[in-house]
Amino acid sequence: MTRDKESKADGDACNDSVTRPDALRVSESEIAASHQQLRTLLVEQVKRCHQWADAYRAWAPEATSADLVEQLTLLLAGTPTPEPPPAKGPAQTPSFAPCEREIRSACMAAIQPLRVVYLGPEYSYSHLAALERFGQNVTLLPVATISTVFEEVARGQAEFGIVPLENSTDGRIADTLDVLAREPATICGEVQIRIHHCLWGSGKISDVRQVHSKPQALSQCRYWLAHHLPDVECLPSGSTSVAAQLALQDVRVAAVASRPAGHALGLNLLAENIEDRPDNVTRFAVVGPLTNRRSGNDKTSLMFELPHRPGALADAMVVFKKNRLNLTWIESFPKPASPQEYVFFVEFLGHTSDPRTRRALRDLEPKTVRVTVLGSYPASSPV
């Protein structure tokens, strides 16, 4: 008998259930049965959500899509799945968070097909943030500009939108703040994504003569690029995904893009984790007509305009100190059509239903020209 045939015979013998130990066969049988039970429970859960939605609409015919999403979110959040204990030894501890996300996504789709608009194209970091927040069971709609995200939500062409708000390396996203300063929208959530940039190409790193990416991505990798590719020209593109497309077409071009973007196009990974700061995080805002109830771990965002006089900003800041509200973000931004004046964006820990927040808003009102509550939403952690 040849070696290949011997190996095949040995493999067949190992796979023969007759030779398998009883304990192994029992364990495999239990795993298969449990998996089937999980699938059955998930199908039943989706059916129950559909039945719940029908009953809710019958009870409250005026309920909007946002109302249904809010109510079901509260239901599904009522019994969070506990994380498993830390693994012993080298094995990595599994996380149930991705499973939970896709279960919620499937349940949402059963009651109300959701459309989510994001700054595209596919595999941009905004796309990854939308997937992280809403899962695979929604219709994801890419658009070319941040302002279009807001417009599509305002026109009812999408229930929710995802826009970048700030980056831990480069700071604010001016296009987002510009839209909010002109036409305030409701912020109903946040997603924080750890940004790990990769260098992709269709050849070898020695072939590279140009590096393309979105300006923010190039900025976040500027020291790495200057050190490893000092003679290479860095050129801006509309997005990291567009840059990856350019790298696919020319062996002399490399792209700074996400890992999914490069894998999707079959590019060669020339270098990974090239961001200058390992704690590089982009925070995205979820916009849409959803009013979140208090979760106990919330943030509230405001935008206000101050009178043009000495001490106006200091007087406003005293309000937050007086009411013991911890600020997590403050940003000044030129007032549209009035470049010498500013609006201020502030975020603090708390919910609009909290007594301290209500007192602060009451105290802030006479000290401002206008104050707008952009929204309260559960605080998130980077993923």
Image: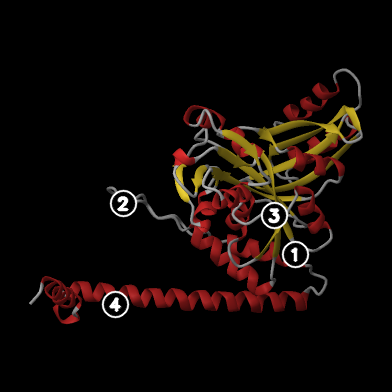
Q: Position of residue 244 (x, y in %)?
A: 57, 49
User: Could you tell me the amino acid type at mark 2?
Assistant: Ala
Q: Nearer the viewer, mark 2 or mark 4?
A: 2
The residue carrying pointer 3 sits among few (fewer than 14), some (14 to 19) or many (20 or more) residues within 10 Å by Cα, namely many
Q: Which element type, helix, strand or loop, lies under badge 2?
A: loop
The Cα–Cα distance between marks 1 and 2, rounded to whole angstroms, is: 42 Å
Residue 381 in sight: no
The Cα–Cα distance between marks 4 and 3, rounded to whole angstroms, is: 44 Å
The Cα–Cα distance between marks 4 and 1, rounded to whole angstroms, is: 43 Å
Residue 29, which numbered label? 4
Q: Position of residue 88 (x, y in %)?
A: 29, 49
Residue 91, which numbered label? 2
Q: Earlier in the sequence, mark 4 or mark 3?
A: 4
The Cα–Cα distance between marks 3 and 1, rounded to whole angstroms, is: 22 Å
Place residue 67 in its image quadrant: bottom right
Label 4 close to label 3 by CB (< 8 Å): no
Q: Which residue corresponds to mark 1?
A: 67
User: Could you tell me the amino acid type at mark 4?
Assistant: Ser
The Cα–Cα distance between marks 2 and 3, rounded to whole angstroms, is: 36 Å
Q: Earlier in the sequence, mark 3 or mark 1?
A: 1
